Amino acid sequence: MRAVLDRSLVDLLGEVRAQVVELLRGTTRTVADLADGLGLSEGAVRRQLQVLERDGLVSAETVRREGPGRPSAHYALTDRAHRLFPDRSAELANELLDFITETYGRQALRAFMRWRQQRQQERYASASNSEHTTTQRAETLAGMLSADGFLSQVVQAPAGTTTLELRQEHCAIADVAAEHPELCAYEAALFKDLLGTRVTRRQTIAGGAQACVCHITDADPHHDDTGVAHGHAR
């Protein structure tokens, strides 16, 4: 019997591959199992599985039978595939922050924000290397933010200016930041502390923009007229 599909999953993967993903949800299945569930040939199912494997959504494990017979491949969803399904973690995070505020006051919320900022400062400490220029530190920070799901890049300023632009084209916590914009303010303060220079938040995804943008004013006195720093920053 075919699974009832989420339309967003169909739009993303196509109907047949969405059916495969739904049938693998919470279990493992062989090609024969999937073919039976979908009413397709095993060859057709294998072609769909190849695409899903290529995209990192399913993985296969060879399982040996007890007794005679060839080993069979059992397919399962990857962690990446599980992220395709509805996730209410942002709702829970918002509820926790609301609870802190309503029960202990905004001072407690600010204390939490400072605590989180300190943890992030330790996590991204390599972006504070005083032997690097402001541009190099910003690029290091952008790489670390991207690894954490924030899809960041540093855009060089036009010639004749001393401003860099740190663009985050995805926000991994946008649903929480939309309800608690303090997160955006504390993040900008974090960037200022890490880079050792002036950072100005211009726009945020949580606020409705297409990207989060911070302007970084290069505090390094050793720079040329391209706006790219070459000396030491501290």
Image (cartoon, grey):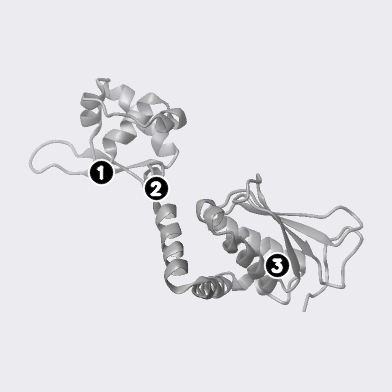
Q: Which residue is disc 1 drawn over?
A: 26
Q: Judge depth for marks 3 and 1 and give the one in front.
A: 1
Residue 31 locus on image (x, y percent) = 25, 31
Disc 3 on helix, strand or loop? helix
Quadrant in the picture for residue 123: bottom right
Q: Which of marks 1 and 2 is in front?
A: 2
> Which residue is denoted by mark 3 in the rendering?
137
Please indicate whether residue 232 sits to the left or right of residue 153 in the image: right
Mark 3 or 2: the one toward you: 2
Say whether residue 149 is visible. Answer: no
* Amino acid beneath label 1: Gly
- Observer-nearest of 142 and 87: 87
Secondary structure at badge 1 equals loop
8 over 141 or under it: above or below? above
Q: Mark 2 points at which residue?
A: 87
Q: Quadrant of the C terminus?
A: bottom right
Q: Which of marks 3 and 1 is nearer the N terminus?
A: 1
Q: Where is residue 127 in the image (x, y as percent from the top left)?
A: 65, 69
Q: What residue type is labelled 2?
A: Asp
Q: Looking at the picture, how far across and down is residue 15, in whole percent?
A: 38, 25
Q: How far is the residue under mark 3 from the one under mark 2?
A: 34 Å
